[in-house]
């Protein structure tokens, strides 16, 4: 019986994700001109905010002019959806956008974001809670990182060994600006949609 409930929950999250992406019913203003520009899985990066000494904020584009993020605001204690228009207004249009290597992985990341974060009361915390794969608490960068991790694409940091060889590793934390590192973008195959703040 419990297995059936879990399958039903997963199916309902997928259906909700599809509604957001295809129809945008009741959640977002899909008339925005930007809605045609972005693709599911695009990552929005802004420099127009800081929290606890960390500059920047990120969100993942769901489609239908909607984003998912977690802000750390007292009025927004858990991951939630926000329209692109509200996100741009809130962060003064100081936004860069990067795109995954293909639409399939972008959609998988959106599905993972919906499955693991949508409607979940996961508290906000930038203090590491056992590494990036532990989402008992989360923050904006981890939400996006984890969504891609579950989609089969892992953002990693570069390290140069004493022999001059480049190796890649999973860090304990991932910050907003880590997504815009040219070295990282090249490694995961992401490209710029909008490169200017």
Image: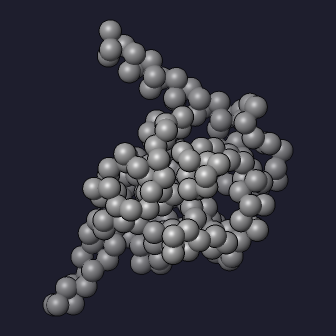
Determine the image quadrant of residue 130.
Answer: bottom left
Q: Position of residue 61 (x, y in %)?
A: 61, 51
Number of callouts in the render?
A: 0
Q: Nearer the viewer, residue 34 or 197?
A: 197
Q: Left of 48 or right of it: where is 31?
A: right
The relative height of residue 193 versus residue 197 in the rendered view (above or below) is above
Where does the image place residue 133, in percent across and percent down from the top left? 32, 52
- Residue furthest to the top in view is 1
* 161 over 120 or under it: above or below: below
In the image as oriented, which residue stretches furthest toward the left? Answer: 163
Task: Determine the residue positioned at 38% across, 21% down.
Answer: 6
Q: Can residue 148 be seen in this view?
A: no
**Which of the 4 image quadrants contains residue 188?**
bottom left
Which corner quadrant holds the N terminus? top left
* Rendered-image quadrant of the C terminus: bottom right
Q: Report if residue 17 is visible in the image.
A: yes
Q: Tell me which residue sits at (42%, 78%) in the image.
A: 183
Residue plotted at (46% across, 43% down)? 122
171, 180: nearer the viewer: 171
Task: Answer left or right for 149 relative to 78.
Answer: left
Query: Measuring 78% from the left and 60% from the top, which residue is drawn there?
Result: 89
Q: Which residue lies furthest to the front in this view?
A: 74
Nearer to us in this view, 148 or 190: 148
In this picture, residue 71 sits left or right of residue 152: right
Query: Which quadrant of the structure image shows residue 34?
Result: bottom right
Does 2 sit left or right of 52 as displayed? left
Residue 128, given in percent of the width and then of the height, sits at 34, 61
Vertical placement of residue 33 versus 168, above or below: above
Q: Please, which colouring scheme is shown? A: one colour
């Amino acid at each position: 019986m419990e297995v059936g409930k879990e399958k039903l929950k997963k199916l309902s999250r997928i259906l909700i994700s599809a509604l957001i992406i295809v129809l945008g019913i009741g959640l977002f203003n899909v008339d925005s001109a930007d809605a045609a520009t972005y693709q599911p899985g695009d990552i929005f990066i802004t420099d127009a905010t800081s929290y606890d000494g960390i500059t920047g904020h990120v969100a993942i584009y769901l489609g239908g002019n909607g984003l998912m993020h977690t802000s750390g605001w007292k009025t927004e204690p858990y991951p939630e959806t926000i329209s692109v228009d509200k996100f741009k207004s809130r962060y003064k249009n100081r936004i860069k956008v990067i795109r995954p290597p293909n639409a399939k992985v972008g959609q998988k990341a959106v599905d993972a974001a919906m499955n693991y974060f949508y409607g979940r009361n996961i508290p906000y915390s930038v203090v590491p809670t056992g590494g990036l794969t532990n989402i008992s608490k989360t923050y904006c960068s981890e939400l996006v990182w984890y969504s891609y991790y579950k989609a089969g694409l892992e953002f990693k940091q570069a390290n140069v060994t004493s022999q001059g060889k480049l190796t890649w590793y999973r860090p304990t934390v991932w910050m907003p600006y880590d997504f815009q590192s040219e070295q990282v973008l090249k490694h995961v195959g992401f490209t710029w949609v909008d490169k200017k703040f």
